Image (cartoon, grey):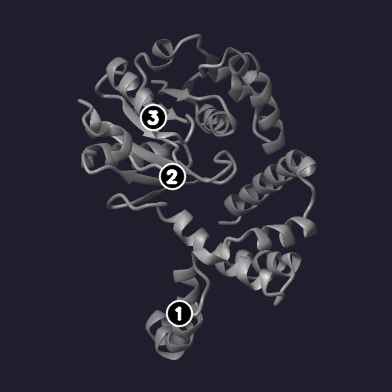
């Protein structure tokens, strides 16, 4: 039986999710409150499909709906992609909780708001969670599943199984935490990167080369925990015994929030392509990420 999914919000992330679900064989219903977004959604999906090298036939699975009620009717999963504004999220979830079947899981793509901020007090809050993707989710498959305090364990089980069924890589969190996991890791790395650049220790290009051709190349195959397990003959315990004091000293002196300065932004902006090039560079990035994903899958 074909699985039915609703995508609420037809922006960049919403369209990427629609492609994820469609190529997995789901019947996808896409809705956005802006009629202009709805009108161009299929054309923009076709472009995303072309750039990622996906089969364009998958887009036959996508229907653009005129209203939210039609989109969520009899679906098992709703992926919400509204603005990162608490008042809007609360309005959306009050309406979704009212019109969607109680068996339907309601998942938010939020990258900043935890579920308790917009689900508290709703009758169906046990079926609401955050399914935080990495931009763009149709070429980067990890998705963080973060429950609210009222999210039912059975809902988390279903969410994890569903994400695996649509070829994503679910990371299940035990409880709410600000920034989830990925953004907390990214924030620490960015802080130290910005400080090293602002202090003139390394150029923006040199910093990016360090990640792209160093840590990033290794992390494409192994995460940091698996990496340190291989970086000492006796595994992770041996690594921490050998290098733990040095790494502790470095982390204790690492940058924190004070590193996010206008000065750092000015230095980096002067060294990187102009904003006018961002859209084209994003397209190139998505194409290359899709090629990398296919290579990794074929050589796993």
Q: Give the mark nearer the N terminus: 1 vs 2.
A: 2
Q: Quadrant of residue 283?
A: top right
Gap between marks 3 and 2 measured at Cα: 14 Å
Quadrant holding the N terminus = top left
Which residue is tagged 1?
252
Taking depth in this image into account, of 3 and 184 the one nearest to the observer is: 184
Q: Give the mark nearer the N terminus: 3 vs 1.
A: 3
Taking depth in this image into account, of 79 and 266 the one nearest to the observer is: 266
Q: Element type at marker 1? A: helix
Instruction: Tell me the residue at 42%/37% (across/down).
Output: 165
Which residue is tagged 2?
112
Cβ atoms under marks 3 and 1 closer than 8 Å: no
Q: Element type at marker 3? A: helix
Q: Which mark is residue 86?
A: none
Cβ atoms under marks 1 and 2 closer than 8 Å: no
Instruction: Tell me the residue at 57%/38% (across/down).
Output: 138
Percent x, y for residue 127?
A: 26, 32
Relative side of 155 to 255, left or right: left
Q: Dot 3, how many residues are within 10 Å of its Cα: few (below 14), some (14-19), or many (20+)?
A: few
> In the picture shown, does residue 189 fall above or below 74?
below
Q: Quadrant of residue 278?
A: top right
Q: Residue furthest front?
A: 262
Gap between marks 3 and 1 measured at Cα: 38 Å
Instruction: Tell me the residue at 71%/36% (across/down).
Output: 51
> In the picture shown, does residue 227 fall above or below 53?
below
Q: Nearer the viewer, mark 3 or mark 2?
A: 3
Instruction: Tell me the residue at 75%/65% (across/down).
Output: 205
Which residue is tagged 3?
87
Relative side of 137 to 5, left or right: right
Gap between marks 1 and 2 measured at Cα: 26 Å
Percent x, y for residue 192?
A: 57, 70
């Amino acid at each position: 039986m074909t699985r039915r999914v609703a995508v609420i919000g037809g922006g960049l992330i919403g369209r990427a999710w629609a492609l994820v679900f469609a190529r997995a064989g789901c019947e996808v219903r896409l809705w956005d409150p802006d009629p202009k977004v709805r009108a161009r959604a299929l054309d923009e999906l076709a472009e995303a499909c072309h750039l990622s090298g996906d089969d364009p036939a998958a887009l036959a699975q996508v229907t653009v709906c005129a209203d939210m009620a039609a989109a969520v009717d009899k679906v098992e999963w709703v992926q919400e992609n509204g603005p990162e504004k608490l008042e809007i999220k609360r309005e959306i979830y009050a309406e979704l909780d009212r019109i969607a079947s109680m068996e339907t899981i309601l998942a938010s793509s939020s990258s900043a708001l935890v579920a308790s901020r917009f689900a508290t007090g709703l009758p169906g809050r046990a079926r609401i969670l955050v399914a935080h993707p990495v931009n763009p989710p149709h070429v980067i498959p990890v998705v963080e599943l973060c429950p609210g305090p009222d999210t039912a364990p059975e809902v988390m089980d279903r969410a994890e199984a569903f994400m695996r069924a649509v070829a994503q890589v679910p990371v299940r969190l035990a409880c709410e935490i600000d920034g989830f996991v990925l953004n907390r890791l990214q924030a620490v790395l960015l802080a130290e990167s910005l400080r090293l650049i602002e202090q003139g220790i390394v150029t923006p290009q040199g910093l990016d080369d360090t990640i792209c051709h160093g840590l990033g190349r290794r992390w494409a195959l192994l995460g940091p925990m698996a990496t340190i397990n291989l970086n000492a003959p006796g595994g992770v315990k041996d690594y921490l015994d050998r290098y733990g004091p040095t790494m502790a000293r470095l982390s204790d002196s690492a940058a924190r929030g004070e590193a996010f300065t206008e000065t750092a932004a000015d230095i980096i902006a002067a060294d990187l392509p102009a904003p006018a090039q961002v859209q084209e560079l994003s397209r190139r990035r998505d194409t290359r990420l899709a090629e990398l994903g296919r290579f990794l899958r074929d050589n796993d």
